[in-house]
Amino acid sequence: MKILALILTILFSQTAISSILVEPQLGYVVNHSADSQLNVTRNGVTSSTNVNASGTAAEIGGRVGLQFLGLMAGGSVVKGASDKGMLTGVFVGYNAPILVRAWAAYHFKSEINYGSVETDGTSIELGAGFTALPLLSINLIYRKYSMDEFVINGLDYTTSDYAPTEIVLAVSAPLTF
């Protein structure tokens, strides 16, 4: 009888440790780099153009989802400062009981603007956080983009060889309810 009570306690108590995750984030892109020579195609004609693709920028965003036994999953949105673009996607991750957390995200809508050049594509993100302080996580994020659509001076182009990368240092507040 005691074993049955223990099993029922374990089964029904697990629902009490699932929660809603809300995580606002403020970050700074410390390195954004890509080839500045870009081959683009418009109406079957391929041409080359230069893109100023390096630099730094601030960003704001967050994640919203569910957390259960340390596992996290949900939606992710990141907005670049000064209209530098926006990322929209989904994430999965693990919040370890002590000091660290890690996640991966797939952004099915990734936009980056370089002045007169606007890009559109997808991206993946790998992140790790250090959670020594309560309600605060210091994160290091790596992103790799795969951009396939461009608007250069109002004209639409396509390409398959443009893959910029970013390294982001961010601070977030992973709140669970």
Image: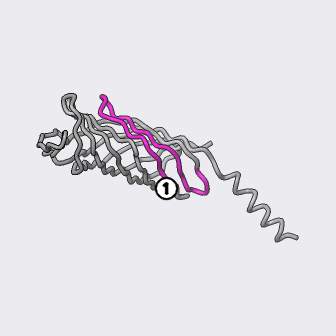
- Name the quarter where the C terminus is drawn: top right
Could you say which is closer to the camera, residue 140 or residue 135? 140
x and y percentages locating residue 88 in the rendered image: 42, 40
Q: Does the segment drawn in magenta span residue 88? A: yes
Residue depicted at x 47% and y 47%: 90
Secondary element at image label 1: loop
Count of numbered tags? 1
Q: Give the vertical position of 7 relative to 134 (above or below).
A: below
- What is the residue that sits farthest to the right in this orientation? 1
x and y percentages locating residue 30 in the rendered image: 27, 44
Q: Which residues are magenta?
A: 67-92
x and y percentages locating residue 155 in the rendered image: 21, 31
Q: Label 1 is placed on what type of residue?
A: Leu
Residue depicted at x 33% and y 50%: 143
Q: Give the vertical position of 33 relative to 78 (above or below).
A: below
Along the horizontal axis of the image, is 22 left or right of 157?
Answer: right
Residue depicted at x 29% and y 38%: 112
Q: Quadrant of residue 116?
A: top left
- Label 1: few (<14), some or many (≥20) within 10 Å? few
- Name the quarter where the N terminus is drawn: bottom right
Residue depicted at x 31% and y 40%: 120
Q: Which residue is mark 1?
A: 99
Q: Overall secondary structure of the magenta stretch?
A: strand
x and y percentages locating residue 104 in the rendered image: 43, 54
- What is the residue that sits farthest to the front in this orientation? 44
Q: Does the segment drawn in magenta span residue 97? A: no
Could you say which is closer to the camera, residue 43 or residue 70? 43
